[in-house]
Image (tube, rainbow, N blue to C red):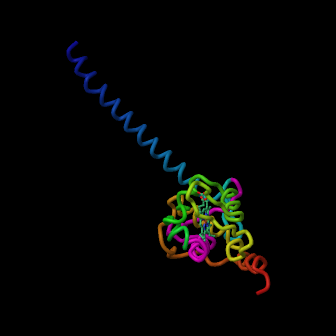
């Protein structure tokens, strides 16, 4: 009888602990894989990547090499948005962090805001997101800017200029020429 109790004392809790450890392990494993799956593009065409909704997304290789559009987006963001939204999408005293914004707004909302602009009309607010829908230097590269910011927002891309990138696809050059029109 006494021996029986001792055996239970030793095996019982131990079994529980390892069960708990196992479920923690399985839980964190599934959390990590879900995250990685979300970040993986669903499809690609000529070096441009798309998510499950068909919206443009980034692709970052195991060596941190980014796709062309993410790299281009970094350059275009820096030229067109940084002066208000701060370096690397992190926000400024004037305009919000787009790294944060893209956690809650989707591609369509992003496009609509950039094209139409936005103005916070709360008391004493004079901050204005300009309407950029007619600005070719923005709109011809808006997908690039979006995928760059999405990568930043997902935590897939660190600050500063991406160290290496895929070559510029011919289709990117063609689309750029068609969008920008004659000089
Ligand atoms: C002249 C300054 C200025 C420039 C340039 C600018 N923005 Fe903004 N942007 C703002 C301000 C200010 C807001 C906040 C407006 C508000 O909330 O009413 C804003 C808001 C936004 C929002 C909405 C964020 C949210 O959480 O709803 C997006 C998206 C955005 N900007 C994208 C861009 C992109 C992309 C560029 C570059 C192509 C850009 N902006 C250039 C000032 C600017």
**Front-most of residues 127 and 117:** 127
**Residue 72 in the image, given as x and y percentages of width and height:** 61, 75
Decide: is 175 above or below 57: below
**Residue 157 in the image, given as x and y percentages of width and height:** 51, 65
Q: Quadrant of ligand 1?
A: bottom right
**Residue 43 in the image, given as x and y percentages of width and height:** 68, 60
Q: Quadrant of the C terminus?
A: bottom right
Furthest-front residue in this view: 124
Q: Is residue 90 magenta?
A: no
Q: Residue at x 57, y 59 (%)?
A: 125
Furthest-bottom residue in this view: 183
The quadrant in which residue 55 appears is bottom right
**Residue 170 in the image, given as x and y percentages of width and height:** 72, 79
Residue 175 as seen in the image, left or right of residue 39: right
Residue 19 as seen in the image, left or right of residue 135: left
Give the total of numbered labels: 0
Q: Quadrant of the N terminus?
A: top left
Q: Residue at x 75, y 75 (%)?
A: 175
**Front-most of residues 55 and 121:** 121
Q: Is residue 75 magenta?
A: yes
Furthest-top residue in this view: 1
Which span of residues is magenta-colored? 53-82
Decide: is 99 above or below 5: below
């Amino acid at each position: 009888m006494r021996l029986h109790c001792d055996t239970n004392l030793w095996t019982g809790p131990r079994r529980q602990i390892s069960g708990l450890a196992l479920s923690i392990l399985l839980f964190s494993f599934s959390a990590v894989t879900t995250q990685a799956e979300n970040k993986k593009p669903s499809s690609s065409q000529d070096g441009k990547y798309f998510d499950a909704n068909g919206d443009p997304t980034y692709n970052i290789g195991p060596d941190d090499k980014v796709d062309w559009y993410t790299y281009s987006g970094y350059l275009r963001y820096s030229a067109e948005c940084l002066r208000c939204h701060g370096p690397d999408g992190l926000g400024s005293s004037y305009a919000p962090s787009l790294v944060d914004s893209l956690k809650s707004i989707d591609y369509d909302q992003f496009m609509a805001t950039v094209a139409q602009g936005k103005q916070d009309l709360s008391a004493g607010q004079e901050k204005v997101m300009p309407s950029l829908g007619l600005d070719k230097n923005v709109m011809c590269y808006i997908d690039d800017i979006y995928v760059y910011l999405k990568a930043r927002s997902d935590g897939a891309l660190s600050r500063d200029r991406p160290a290496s990138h895929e070559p510029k696809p011919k289709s990117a050059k063609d689309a750029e020429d068609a969008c920008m029109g004659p000089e």
